[in-house]
Structures are given as C-alpha cells and as structure tokens.
Image (spheres, rainbow, N blue to C red):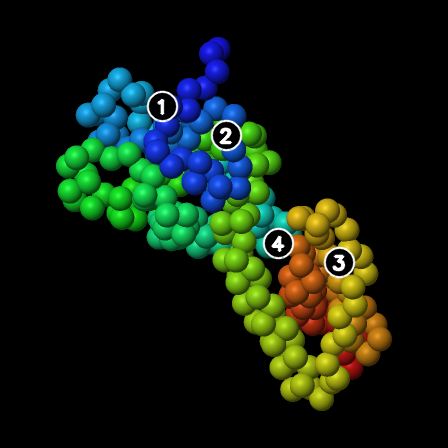
Amino acid sequence: MPPPDRSRTSVGLAALEARLGLIFRDPRLLHQALRHSSYAHENPDEGPSNEQLEFLGDAVLSLTVSHLLLKAFPHSPEGELSRRRAALVNARTLAAVARGLQLGDFLLVGKGEERQGGRNKPSLLADALEAVLAAVYLDQGLDAAARLVETWLGPLLAAQEEQDVQDAKTRLQEWLQARGQPPPEYVVLEESGPSHARRFRVALRLDGRTVAEGVGSSKKAAEQEAARQALAALARGDGAQAAD
C-alpha cells in the first residue's frame, strides 16, 4: 500500500488531531470520517461517505461505554446498566462532545447541507463523532478508542457516580439516624490498577463490624456500592444485628 497522502485531507486536519490527542497513521481514515454523504455525492472521486464508519463507531461506542459502566457499577443489574448507557450515549450528548471538539469546523458537507446549517445539526455532529471514533479504532486500536470515550464521557460518568454516592450514603445515614445508630465508617481495603484505571475496594462498618463491601473505579464509587449493599442487607435483616 502506498504511503498516506496528507494532501488529500482537509485543511487544518492536524488541529483536529491535536484536539483528539493523537496523530493518525493513515489520515485518510479521518478524512473519510468527516465526509458527509451530501459531500460524497457531490464529490464522488474523493471517496465514500462516513456512513459505514458511523455504523462501526456506534458499535465501538456501545462496547467501550458498557465496559466503563461495568467498572464503575460492578454489581448493577443489566436493566440499570442499560439505562445508564442510554443516558450517556445519545445524540444530544454526542453532539455536545462534537461541539467541544469544534468538529463542525472540519466537516465536509455538500452545498445544500451547508446552506441549511448542516455543520451545526445535532444528528450530523453525533454521527460524525461516531465515525471519528471508528477511524481511531481502525487506525490505532480499541485501547486508543476507549481512552477517547473515557475522556469524552468521563465527566458524565463521574456525575452518575456522584449522584449515586449521595443517594445511597444519604439513605443509609437516614436509616441509621432514625434508629439512633452512629454513622457508618468507610475503610479502603485495597487500591489497585494503573493510574488511568484505578480500582478501589471499600468496607462499610457499623459499630466496628463489617456489613458490606463495595468495589468501584473511585473511592466514592466504591463507598456508594458498599452503602447500597449495606442497605440491601439491612432490608433483608442481615445487618440488623450489626446495627443494633
């Protein structure tokens, strides 16, 4: 295969690579990811549109987000994980990420689409972002694609974890207070994994007795899981003796 021809890529593509934090081995993949069907129709000699890459990128996104959710909420049932994924992966969220990258500035759209403001359409931006993710996957592998997804959606995932932390820990605190019991103690038992994928294991103790443990990608997430497990145990009566 001949070496990639950077002259065929859109002007300023290096700026987008900088925002993505990587340099494509084959920049033609990124160029295709930015090529809307309206542009491809008007310029057939430049290659296919980004529709196939969008199809692949949707699958890569679903896989990587599912993996992130399993790490963050290891004991959540399938239905809850599906709801969380839907909250993270939708056109509105993806379009917001695309706008943060100023992806619209790099899109190749047809003249009609340009007149209709296609560069700012949420659906078009979301599709292009998925196509870019697929291009990264094909060019540099799943790990690189997963790192991008974590960068893009990490703050939203952290917000989900924080909300759960407050909900579970607050419910447990209220349950104990209503029964005149002291507050729980959270103790980190183990911290492992590389810096970009830390794993925490936390014990929840009531009156010095461990009644639950939680695992998560952050200390707060592990505490949340421990609180949820403790609430479940108390509801069943398993932790009543420790709380009394």
Left or right: where 100 falls relative to 148 = left
x 62%, y 54%: residue: 72
Q: Upstream in the sequence, badge 3 or badge 1?
A: 1
Do the CB atoms of the residues marked 4 and 2 lie less than 8 Å apart? no
Left or right: where 23 falls relative to 198 = left
Q: Nearer the viewer, mark 4 or mark 1?
A: 1
Q: Residues within 10 Å of mark 3 (few under 14, many from 20)?
A: many
At label 3, which amino acid type do we have? Arg
Quadrant where the C terminus sits is bottom right
**Residue 152 vs residue 178, the one in the foreground:** 152
Q: Is residue 244 above or below residue 229?
A: below
The residue pinned by badge 1 equals 8
Judged from the image, the secondary structure of the residue bearing numbered disc 4 is helix
At label 1, which amino acid type do we have? Arg
In 3D space, how far apart are the residues under numbered discs 3 and 1 (Cα atoms)?
50 Å
Q: Which numbered tag is attached to residue 72?
A: 4
Q: Which numbered tag is attached to residue 201?
A: 3
The residue pinned by badge 2 equals 24
In 3D space, how far apart are the residues under numbered discs 4 and 2 (Cα atoms)?
30 Å
- Residue 58 can be seen, yes or no: no
- Residue 8 can be seen, yes or no: yes
In 3D space, how far apart are the residues under numbered discs 4 and 1 (Cα atoms)?
41 Å
Residue 123, horizontal then vertical, whole percent = 29, 45
Judged from the image, the secondary structure of the residue bearing numbered disc 1 is helix
Residue 203 sits in quarter? bottom right
At label 4, which amino acid type do we have? Ala
Q: Is residue 206 above or below residue 32?
A: below
